[in-house]
Amino acid sequence: MGNGTRLGRVRGLGASHHGTGHWLQQRLTALGNVLLVVWFFVSLLRLPLGDHGAVLRWAANPTVALALILMVVSVFWHLRLGLQVMIEDYVHGEAARLFAIVVLNFYAIGAAAYGIFAIARIAFAGGSAA
Amino acid sequence: MAGKQPSARPLSPHLGVYKWAPSMAVSIFHRITGDGLAIVGALMFLWWLGALAAGPDAYAAFVACVWHDPDAGTVHRVTNILGKVVLVGLTWAFFQHLFSGLRHLVLDTGAGYELKINRLWSTLVFVGAILATAATWLYIAKEALNG
């Protein structure tokens, strides 16, 4: 690993212009995903998934709803970082890459907002409606 | 990037000149499964979650499309098969990406770069993902048969 210029070392950003932030966030959200997605996966296996009322009561439980929201944040943050790397590797040309990154951000943030809103809707209203 | 430069400069050898090794395969599969989960997996999850929030009718429509329709028309007969194929694929992608990701977290500590160890872990990721996927779906099939 080179030491770079003095100014480069002060800024600590290197050739990628965003330093180690991306790398570290990917690892931290990966840890979050290991815990939360494994929990979600096991929960799905144990739930009677064909029974709307039973699944709704499970998801409306405050602890479950909170964990689901955390999972959406961790997963969509992680997938935004991962898809960004794919775009940076395979989409060439400044304009096309910028456009792809913008679309990616709209997807990741929009989809996460949709997911969180759905969980909130279930938690605040769904449990009793079943 | 390369397109803008004079072509006389030497290029680094492309993938084609290397002999495939488990470590290369596990690397590209990490990307493929990750991107697959990020798009197909995330959209399936949101579809399910949105249907769950929207009420019993929307949820029944989701189940009828993806899993099983009691009065199966031609369309749903096809989508039921496709749904299961996608779900099995997502299960495998999940385990492949999970095990491969755990391998990366260990590699980040500086461990596991010896050739034999690296090859062993890469192979174990593939074997583990297939075994875990098979175990999951055997469990699902067993539960379905027991009602």
Image (cartoon, rainbow, N blue to C red):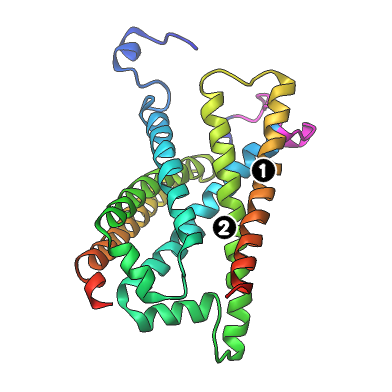
Q: Nearer the viewer, residue B14 or A116?
A: A116
Q: Position of residue B29 (x, y in %)?
A: 63, 44
Query: How crowded is the residue under tag 1: few (<14 C-alpha within 10 Å), some, or many (20+)?
Result: some
Q: Which residues are magenta?
A: B6-22
Q: Amino acid at mark 2?
A: Leu
Q: Position of residue B36 (x, y in %)?
A: 54, 54
Q: Secondary structure at mark 1?
A: helix
Query: Which chain is home to disc 2?
Result: B
At 65% across and 54% down in the image, what residue appears?
B135
- State the residue position of label 2: B90
As measured in the structure, the alpha-carbon distance from the residue carrying label 2 to the one carrying label 1 is 15 Å
Work out whether residue A94 can be spotted. Answer: no
- State the residue position of label 1: B128
User: Is B9 part of what is drawn in magenta?
Assistant: yes
The quarter in which the C terminus of chain B is drawn is bottom right
Q: Quadrant of residue B9?
A: top right
